[in-house]
Amino acid sequence: MRDSKAEILSFWFSEISPRQWFQPSVSLDERIRNRFLVIYKMAREGICDAWKSEPEGCLALCLLFDQFPHHLFRGKRESLDMADRALSVAKYAVSKGFDQALPPLRRRFVYLPYE
């Protein structure tokens, strides 16, 4: 089985540029949908909950629940379905001090669910 957590982080922080993070893009939406929709659905069902045991895992879940839905379901109500779950993971990460173990740029994505 592939390391989906590492794949999420590599995609977000290495394969795409920061200017793409918040810019609507049909092609990026399609890339994320093709590559991460299955893992998003698995995480939504709790299959990836063990990722919460470490900083990078919490970060991957925050991305998966807070950022990726905007690409997976652009313009649809479903894009906000996991907002509460993203906030729960973010609060857990902060309570464990995991946010402080991440570089500042990555840490930002643990805090975004609070907005």
Image: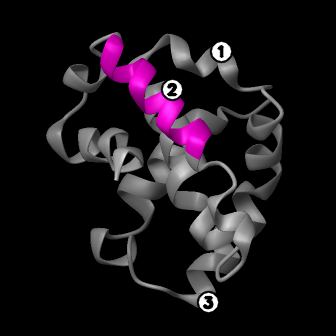
Q: Mark 2: which amino acid?
A: Gly
Picture coordinates of residue 41, whole percent (x, y) = 82, 46
Nearest the eye: 94 or 98: 94
Q: Which residues are magenta?
A: 84-95
Q: Identify the mark at residue 57; answer none if there is no mark.
A: 2
Find disc 3 in the rendering and name its residue.
Answer: 26
Left or right of residue 40: residue 110: left
Q: Earlier in the sequence, mark 1 or mark 3?
A: 3
* Residue sticking out furthest to the left: 104
Find disc 1 in the rendering and name its residue.
Answer: 50
Element carrying mark 3: helix
Q: Mark 3: which amino acid?
A: Val
Element carrying mark 1: helix
* Residue sticking out furthest to the bottom: 26
Picture coordinates of residue 19, whole percent (x, y) = 29, 77
**Which residue sits at x=77%, y=57%?**
37
Left or right of residue 80: residue 12: left
